[in-house]
Amino acid sequence: MENQNVPQKQEEQLPWYKRAQNYFEDLRMEMRRVTWPTWEQVRATTTIVVVAVFAFAAYFTVVDFFVERGISKVFQTFTR
């Protein structure tokens, strides 16, 4: 977010340290606006992500097993 006090053209003419200072002021202002989740929300969403990762891993393991068996059967059929 651009510093509201300095127009774009003037912003480009400022020395690098003033632009950096403006950037960090804007950053600090934006970080104050952030709505941070509660600890309970963080734990709940983390649990959901971990369970989903294991569920997808199990699903793809089963799919991989059957696809591998099917491809092996096709190769065995054509190599006889």
Image (tube, rainbow, N blue to C red):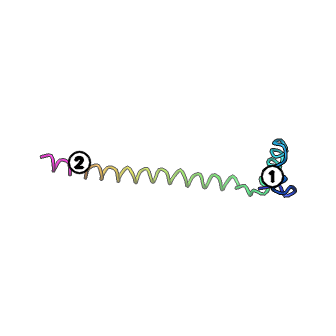
| Magenta-tinted stretch | 72-80
> What residue is shown at x 79% (from left), y 48% (from top)?
23
Magenta stretch secondary structure, dominant:
helix
Quarter of the view holding residue 45: bottom right
Say if the magenta span includes residue 76: yes
Find residue 54 and report its horizontal and vertical position in percent. Answer: 47, 50
**Label 1, label 2: how far apart the Cα atoms are:** 60 Å
Name the residue nearer the viewer: 33 or 48: 33
Quarter of the view holding residue 41: bottom right
Number of dots carrying numbers: 2
Between disc 1 and disc 2, whose residue precedes?
1
Say if the magenta span includes residue 17: no
Label 2 Cα crowd, 10 Å radius (few <14 / some 14-19 / many 20+): few
Label 1 Cα crowd, 10 Å radius (few <14 / some 14-19 / many 20+): some
Name the residue nearer the viewer: 13 or 35: 13
Q: Is residue 78 left or right of residue 40?
A: left
Marker disc for residue 39: none
Find residue 69 and report its horizontal and vertical position in percent. Answer: 26, 50
| Amino acid type at mark 2 | Ser
Find residue 70 and report its horizontal and vertical position in percent. Answer: 25, 52
| Amino acid type at mark 1 | Asp
Please identify, in this view, whether the residue under mark 1 or under mark 2 is nearer the observer: 1
Marker disc for residue 72: 2
Identify the element where label 1 is drawn: helix
Marker disc for residue 26: 1
Kindly give the residue lying farthest to the top in the view shown: 17
Name the residue nearer the viewer: 64 or 9: 9
Q: Is residue 20 left or right of residue 68?
A: right
